[in-house]
Structure formats: structure tokens, C-alpha cells
Image (cartoon, grey):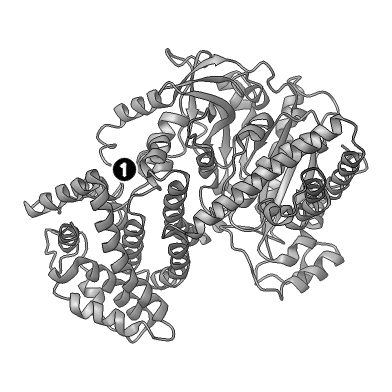
Amino acid sequence: MDDAFQFILARLFHPSCGEDNRCLFDPVSHFEGETATDVGVARKLNAALIIGLAGSRHPHYTQAISLLDAMKTHNRWGPIALFYRTGIDLIHREIDAVCRRDAGFADSVRTLAAWMAQDGDIGDRDSLAERLWSVFCPEAAGVLDARYEKVERLREKRAVTVTEHNENPVESVREILFTSNALLTLPSRSTDIGDLSLSADVLNELSRVAREPQVFWYDHPVQIGVTPEQNEILYGLRGLDDTMAYELSRGNVDSGEKCVCALSVSVTHTGLHSVARRYVAEELARTGGFENLHVYVFCESDTQAIIEKVLTPAAEHYMDRRDAGELLTVFGVDGEYGRHYSFLKALAAFWRALIDGRVKATFKIDLDQVFPNEELVAETGRSAFEHLATPLWGATGVDAAGEPVTLGMIAGALVNRDDIHRSLFTPDVTFPDRALSLDEHIFFSAVPQALSTDAEMMTRYDTAPYDGIHTVFQRIHVTGGTTGIRVDSLKRFRPFTPSFIGRAEDQAYIISTLPKGREALGYVHESGLIMRHDKDAFAREAIESAAMGKLIGDYLRILYFSAYARVIDDDLQTVKSRVDPFTGCFISKVPLSVVYLRFALRAAAFFEEQRDRDGVAFIETGVPRITDAVARTTGDSSAVKTRYHTERRGWDLYYDILDAITTALEGGDDFAGTLKKRAEAVIEECAVRIRSDDTT
């Protein structure tokens, strides 16, 4: 079977495409180019991988392998040469192993090879892409020519027959703990810290922190010192404040009542923990603060205070657990995106147990999104809060497979700012209609993303059989904002996103709950709960600067999601069948092959487009990150497997502790009362105070 695979690649990367483009890409010009510059070396090494994968059928195969072997010990280029050389062996072993155990996959490889052997029209790029997707991205194959049928079939798969509505829905904004996450970093290098309009204490701290090494990297963190117009933190909180004012005008909020927003702050430098809350408070004060919000800022040091002062003592006192301090490190905000995402959800259970027993649920917003209040009411007849007050959130039902499901989570949708004039129900991701780049012929997630956006996120409850009363939809494809979960479901199902997930942490969350012989937890689709996505309106430069890192993160997503799914169930298809098409397309049977091919072809495309500096930067940035991810995700005893089970124990312990404290408080236990006072003191320290009336 490996011979058939090499034949496929030999045809794709034939050394003489000719004018009729009878191959996908000819790497020879890159391989035979000069090596006197960084660009030349990078192009040549990248081409060597492509040629090496094509095997001995390629006339430059021997030279390519020899080059990679010779360069493995080079001071600068050695790790990159080793990455490419190792990749050739990893891919061939992976393809061979999967073909041996998966007859369906083996048949797809044979079918593709036979098509190419029979002089399949490789020059027809659309036809070629469909054929390649059948092997490397099957969730995209066949969709573009049957999109309407695919949408309807996916809707049928996601349908839930409601058996019981929730008799205890959300009835007040104080019953929802709103949450969001801010990513914070130092001022730009071109900024003179002394010129910033911040307090002397904050400026002194920033000068000190600037000498620290960076420990975490995020896509486009807020740089301290940006103008208020460019500050995502201020933008998102102002939008939530405006929404609460609008709800007050509709009579959904009592006069003087404020909603609570817990804001986690993930920082790139450890020393920023001491600055973050003061910085946020000073920036809010400059803009006048908020009339309708109580804001609490949580840094890593604050979450550690909760562990040390409340959770660990409770575990030792009520459960005789001496390992709590180590296991509870899952509770925090720094690190990969999965860590703060899990914290923001889990915090609601802590809040209900020790701070405010009225809290029934939590709802997360992203700071580049706002509720378009006037449009919501005009098009749906309901405001944001009125959507959240639905008895469908927390309802129970039976899914399309006849299995029970609790709709303890809720999910809305997004509309881009530039599209909202057309309708709230304008998908923020549409089916692509453009020429494909080289790497997109191998893997093109935009197709299943558009499919699930249309089928899941844009569905309206206005026609039979989906009436939004007796029959609803459950969601798999969700976004980081516009999602919520009830506290009772948190405590029962204990979902989390593992801290090794650095991309699509929102979609990874539900994977931890996939059932093994028990009732499922699901997101109810709340039709019309739509937020306006404004990222391009105020953070375009930051988004563009983060594009390369985001692209590499997309490759890591395939490696980690594929390994994660295998941890949940030995049969990869069991998990995939639940979360296809969009989330599932990143769970690959051949993740190494997909990632290496995508990476090499994307690098080649940079060079083909004369973006030489981007090509070199892409290779030098991506290779170490992918190398690390490959090491962590391969093998039966992978680091992913170990980490997942450790974190599962940590979250189970977290909820067990809260149950123990709740029971003790109900019984009037003195130590529980002490823990409650400690918790209140920590939360009070996290409060952002701007005016004298900022009290809970």
C-alpha cells in the first residue's frame, strides 16, 4: 500500500508539469536553486521533503535524501533538515499502518492511485482536489456539489426531540456569571513606556517586566498602551455594558441591578500578573467606567490564591486528600487557550457554592463581539437576555440516534460587522468560491466549516419539523463566545478543555463529555442569539500580524485533536462520527501525513508567490512547534494521554471539593464558613473598583 501512496505523490510532484499542469507542483526548481542565502537553503530543504515523499520514482530522490541527511548536523539548519528527514519516514509508516488496519482508508488510497494511473485529469484542479480530499480531508469531499443535501442531512443528524423543558430557567441577569478572557502583553517595542498615561507604580512595574523573558505566546494580545479605540478589553466590556443598559430599558433588569463579568487575564510575561488588574482599572477609569457591570479580573496569581486558601484546605479537611495542590493546577488562566477556557466555565460552580448562590449558569463572550441589540429585537423579537432565558437551556430530549441528551449548554452564532446590514442570519463563513492554494488541495477545512455554519449556526426555528419547542437542534460547531453552560450540568458532566489545546478550545470542550454508555451533554442551538463580530473594525493590524502563528496553530490542531480523540475512545471513528464535519475534520486518521504535506506545500506557496521572507519565517517558526507537537502526540503512551487523564482527575477533584463545601455549609460547619470568608476575600481582591458605588 505504501507503493500506491508513493505513486500518488510521484504524480503530484512530477518534475515536468508542462504547460498543461499535469501535476500539482514541481519542486525541482526550488531544489536546484542556489543555497548562498537563507531563502535558498529553506527552499531547497522544503523541496527535499516533497521529493523524498515521492520516493524513488522521482529522479531527484537520491539527491534529496542525501541533502537532508548531510544537513542534519548543521548548526542552524540541522533541526529543520532533521524535521523533514524524519517526516518522510513518519508519513510512510503512518500510511502503511493505517491502510493495514482500516480497509476503508486503504480502498480510498487505491482508488486515488488507480485514477492517477488511468491518466486522471490532474490538470483539472477542482477534480484533483476532490480526489485528494477523499483521502486526506474526507469531510470536504463531495460537499461543494451537494451542499444543500449535505446541509439537510446534517440538520437531521443534529435534531433533538424535547422530552422535558427546563422548569428552572434563567430569570435574572444576576443568575448568569458572564465571562471573557483578555490576552495581555507588554507595550510594543516602539513605545516609550515612560510616555504612557498610566500611574507611576504601573510604569515602574512595566519597566521591570520588560526585562523578563516571554513565557507564553498568544495570537494577538492587547499591548499595554494601545489607544482606547484599539483596546479589545475596553471594547468588549463597553459592549456588554451597553447591552445591560438596553435590557434595563426593556424591563429585564431592575433599576440599580448590575451584571457580573469575570475577566480572566492571560499574560505573556509572568511579571504582568502584578500589573494586569491595575492596568485594566486605570484604563476603565479613563473611559468613565461602567454603569451596569461589576468586573472581576483573574490572573494566574489569583487562581493560585483560590487553590491555596480555599480548595486545597477543603480537600485535606473533608476528603483527606494530600495530592490536591498538584492536581488542582488545572485551575488557572495562563498557558494554552484550553486552560483559561476551562477556568471560565468552571468558575461558575465556585461562584454558586461560595460567592452567590443565585448563579445558575455562565455565559462567555469574546471581547471583539457585541450584541447588536436593536437588530436582535427587530429580527428575532427578543433581546439577548430574553434568548438566554429560554426553557430550552437545560431541557432534556432524545437525539436523532434515539439516545438521551441533556441540553445543559447553549450556543449562539455570529454575524460579521460588514454583513449585518443584510440580515442577522448572514453566515460569517460561506462556501468558498476561489482558486485553491497548493496546501488546500490536501486539506481544506473551509468547506466543512461553511457546511456546519449553514446547517447548525444559521438554522431558524420557523418551519416544521424544527419548531424550537418540540424539536430543536444540538450544536457541535460553536465559537469561543456566545456559549454558556448551566452550573448543574457543570457539576454533573464535568466538561473541560485539556490545557494542551491551543486552538479551537471551544470545540474541544464537548469532546471531554462524549458518552460511553451514559446520557450525553449537548449544546442547544438558540436560534437568533447572535453577536456581531467586529474584529476587523478595530484590530485588523493585530490580526494580520498574527496570521502566520494562527496558520501554524491550525496544523497543531490536527495533531492534538487527533491524539485527543484517541484518548477518549480507542476507535477514532466513534468520536469523529459525533463531531463531523467541521470539528471532526481536524481529527484525522493520518494526522502526520496531513500536517507535513500542508506545511511543505504552504511553504512552497510562499516561495512561489515571491514572499521569500515569509517562507523562511514560516519554516523557522513552524518547525520547532510542530516537532514538539509530534513528540507529544505520537505513541500509545503519549504526553497527551498522560496529561488528559491527570487533568480529568484534577477536575473531578475540583467538583468533589465544591460538593463537600456546599454540604458542609448547609450543615452549618464552622470550617466551611471560614472557607467561604476566604473565598469572598479573594474575590474581593479581584474586583475592579472605579467609583465609590462599585459594590456587589
> Picture coordinates of residue 253 (x, y %)?
78, 24
**Can you tell which quarter of the image residue 369 is in?**
top right
Extreme front residue here? 320
Residue nearer the viewer, 678 or 383? 678
Residue highlighted by disc 1: 433
Count of marks overlaid on the render: 1
Is 552 left or right of 325, judged from the image as shown? left
Q: Secondary structure at mark 1?
A: loop
Is any atom of residue 38 visible in this view?
yes
In the picture shown, does residue 102 fall above or below 383?
Answer: below
Kind of residue at badge 1: Asp
**Can you tell which quarter of the image residue 594 is in?**
bottom left
Is 261 left or right of 644, judged from the image as shown? right
Is any atom of residue 581 visible in this view?
no
**Can you tell which quarter of the image residue 295 is in?**
top right
Residue at horizontal 77%, vertical 48%?
Answer: 320
Is 18 left or right of 401, judged from the image as shown? left
Of the 4 image quadrants, the one containing the C terminus is: top right
Near mark 1 (Cα within 10 A), the count class, few <14, some 14-19 or many ≥20, is few
Residue at horizontal 77%, vertical 37%?
Answer: 660
In the picture shown, does residue 670 fall above or below 391?
Answer: below
> Picture coordinates of residue 297 (x, y %)?
77, 49
Is 665 left or right of 408, judged from the image as shown? right
